Image (cartoon, grey):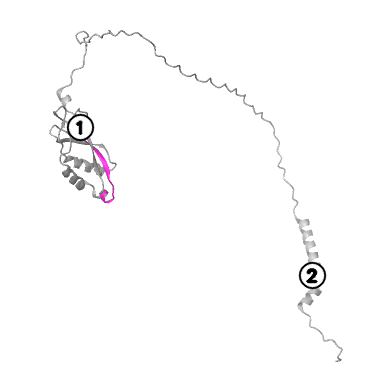
Amino acid sequence: MTQNAVPARNETANDRLKKSWDNWFWGSMIVAVAAHFSIFQFWPDMTAEDVSFTADELEAVEIPPEVEIPPPPEAIQRPATPVISEANIDEDITIAPTTFEDNPIDDLPPPPTASAASDVSGAPSFTPYDVAPTVMNAREVQRALEREYPALLKDAGIGGVVRVHFYIDESGIVQNKLVDQSSGHPQLDEAALAVAEIMRFSPAQNRDKNVAVWVSLPITFQVR
């Protein structure tokens, strides 16, 4: 081997790819053209569907008549200013007394019976009095409030006010009791009636005379 000889170089894959590039390119182009030709040759024909329509008859729409707006109402006139009229009144005018003898009345209703007039203990009613009854056993009532307070409501901190109708006789004793206004809790209402059972009052008076009356008093249950 002479000194001027050039040693042979090993051929790489990149070199082989460069040599075969033209063959791959033109071969791909021929395959693509053949594929497109086949698609256009064998693809079914596509046509647009006719979606047009025709109207056989046109319907005319009637326009409503024009509404005439009435004119605004006239302004309300101010009321006339009152004027004090002058009249001459005779100061000597007298009114004749009216008596049953001069004006008899026929078909008067019968007077109420004694039992109907005196028995008012069945339902609350008004009886005139000028001295109201007062509670005489306040400490006993306070102990009864604590004793009758429902434990379940007391532990839950629930209280309320119950107004109770009392029928108090001439001796100050409670003869009847009814719930006037409920507290909203039936247990408190029942407890209030139990407390009302032991309450004692001073009798009501009307013109220094003991009278039986209906009164409405509140009974309050509260956690202290």
Residue closest to the eye, 30 or 71 = 71
Q: Pick whichever, 121 or 16, lies toward us.
A: 121
Compared across the picture, whether 182 is left or right of 72 comes to left
In the image, which disc is placed on residue 53?
none
Query: Can the viewer see residue 145 in this picture?
Result: yes
**Residue at the location (14% across, 23% down)?**
114
Task: Confirm whether the magenta stretch covers residue 162.
Answer: yes
Q: Nearer the viewer, mark 1 or mark 2?
A: 1
**What numbered label is drawn on residue 214?**
1
Left or right of 146? Residue 67 is: right
Residue segment shown in magenta: 153-167
Given residues 200 and 124, the one toward you in this image is: 200
The answer to whether residue 176 is magenta is no
Q: Which of marks 1 and 2 is nearer the N terminus?
A: 2
Q: In this view, does 142 lie above or below 168?
A: below
Above or below residue 81? Residue 14 is below
Q: What residue did someone put label 2 on?
A: 24
